[in-house]
Amino acid sequence: MAKTTEKRERRWMRPSKRAKGYAAERKAKVHQRGEKEGQELDDYNKGLRSGYLLCQSDHAGSYKYDEAIKAGKSKEEAAAYSRTIGKGDKK
């Protein structure tokens, strides 16, 4: 394998933008960007997209839990708040 000297750039998107694209691809069941655009998603790529979306949800929940604990809420209150979807109230 020959090394190239050209400088490569990392493809980076905001997590919410990537998640939105992955959700759209899962719904359409086709690649919507890149080299495989228009090709059907195989089981492996479906799993990658599902895993990424679940991961984003987990990160949001753990962040909300930590913020509620810092605000002085009990563990039960923080756990309930971390399971809310959207901005919700910190009740």
Image: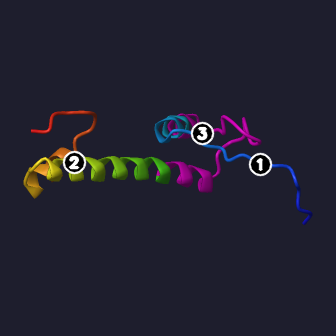
Query: Which residue is disc 2 drawn over?
Result: 67
Lateral position of residue 75 relative to residue 30, left or right = left
Q: Is residue 66 magenta?
A: no
Mark 1 crowd level (few <14, some 14–19, many ≥20, 10 Å Cα): few
Q: What is the number of the mark on residue 8?
A: 1
Q: Which amino acid is tagged 3?
A: Lys
Lateral position of residue 44 relative to residue 54, left or right = right
Q: Residue at coordinates 42% horizontally, 53% vertically from top-left? A: 55
Which mark is in front, 3 or 2? 2
Magenta stretch: give its range. 22-50
Distance in Å between CA atoms under marks 1 and 3: 29 Å
Q: What is the number of the mark on residue 53?
A: none
* Residue contact at pointers 1 and 3, CB within 8 angstroms: no
Q: Residue at coordinates 88% horizontally, 54% vertically from top-left? A: 5
Q: Residue at coordinates 41% horizontally, 48% vertically from top-left? A: 56
Mark 2 crowd level (few <14, some 14–19, many ≥20, 10 Å Cα): some
Looking at the rendered image, the quarter that the N terminus falls into is bottom right
Q: Is residue 27 magenta?
A: yes
Q: Earlier in the sequence, mark 3 or mark 2?
A: 3
Disc 1 on helix, strand or loop?
loop
Q: Earlier in the sequence, mark 1 or mark 3?
A: 1
Which mark is in front, 1 or 3? 1
Query: Which residue is disc 3 drawn over?
Result: 29
Mark 3 crowd level (few <14, some 14–19, many ≥20, 10 Å Cα): some
Q: Which amino acid is tagged 1?
A: Arg
